[in-house]
Image (tube, grey):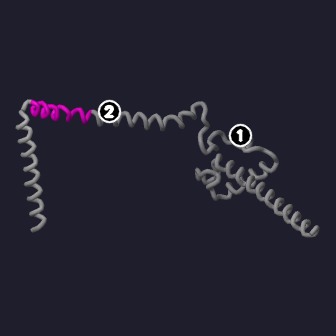
Amino acid sequence: MVIHLKKISFVFFVVLFITIVNSSVASAGAILSDLENQLMCKCDDKCGKVLINCTCSTADKNRKKFTKMLESGLTVDQIVQQQIEKYGETILSAPSKNGFNLTAWVIPFGAIMIGGIGIRKLVNGWVEKKKPAIELQNIEGDAASESGAEKSSEVTSSKYSRRLKDELDRLET
């Protein structure tokens, strides 16, 4: 019984150790991926890709360099700051959210809003042009008697009935 308990506790600690080691490796990979998503590749080809998507040799060298930096204890923010000091803000995959770069975040939404307002005014203008003709018909219709309104609906109905009959006759022939 004691031997069985020792085996179970040994297996438990081995599994626990493997789990801890794997989680730290996965965590380091996630941190490196986060760093690669924040930075652009600065290769000689000027590919313009985010570092995580670039497959050139320069990107591989940068990954190794960043892995060593992370292992030495630097944080992602510290590494990003070093890269900004070395290459400028062009190394960032997304513009910073302060100063003039804030316009890159605000202008697209502003343009969409202004465009929507402009389209609405344009459509309302088109609708307003058609309203006077409809209002004239309504005024003339109100002046006519109810029997006249019934006659006009009957005329319209018979007109469409004739048109439908003609089109069905054409389809049959």
Between disc 1 and disc 2, the foreground one is 2
Q: What residue sits 6% from the left and 33% below the top?
A: 145
Residue 7 screen position, x and y as percent:
89, 68
Find numbered disc 2 in the image and state the secondary structure of the residue it sits on: helix
Quadrant, the C terminus:
bottom left
Relative placement, left or right, of 10 versus 113 is: right
Q: Which residues are magenta?
A: 125-142
- How many other residues sit within 10 Å of disc 2, few (<14), some (14-19) or many (≥20)? few
- The tag earlier along the polypeptide, 1 or 2, is 1
Q: Is residue 138 magenta?
A: yes
**Quadrant in which residue 23 is drawn:** bottom right
Residue 37 screen position, x and y as percent:
64, 49
For label 1, the residue is 81
**Quadrant in which residue 130 is drawn:** top left
Relative placement, left or right, of 31 versus 123 is: right
The amino acid marked with disc number 1 is Gln
Q: Nearer the viewer, residue 96 or 141?
A: 141
Vertical arrangement, residue 157 with respect to residue 60, above or below: above
- How many other residues sit within 10 Å of disc 1, few (<14), some (14-19) or many (≥20)? some
For the view shown, which residue lies furthest in the front direction?
A: 1
Q: What residue sits 8% from the left and 41% below the top?
A: 150
Find numbered disc 1 in the image and state the secondary structure of the residue it sits on: helix
Vertical arrangement, residue 149 with respect to residue 36, above or below: above
The amino acid marked with disc number 2 is Lys
Q: What residue sits 29% from the left and 34% below the top?
A: 124
**For the image shown, how many numbered marks are present on the structure?**
2
Q: Is residue 151 magenta?
A: no
Residue 5 screen position, x and y as percent:
90, 66
For label 2, the residue is 121
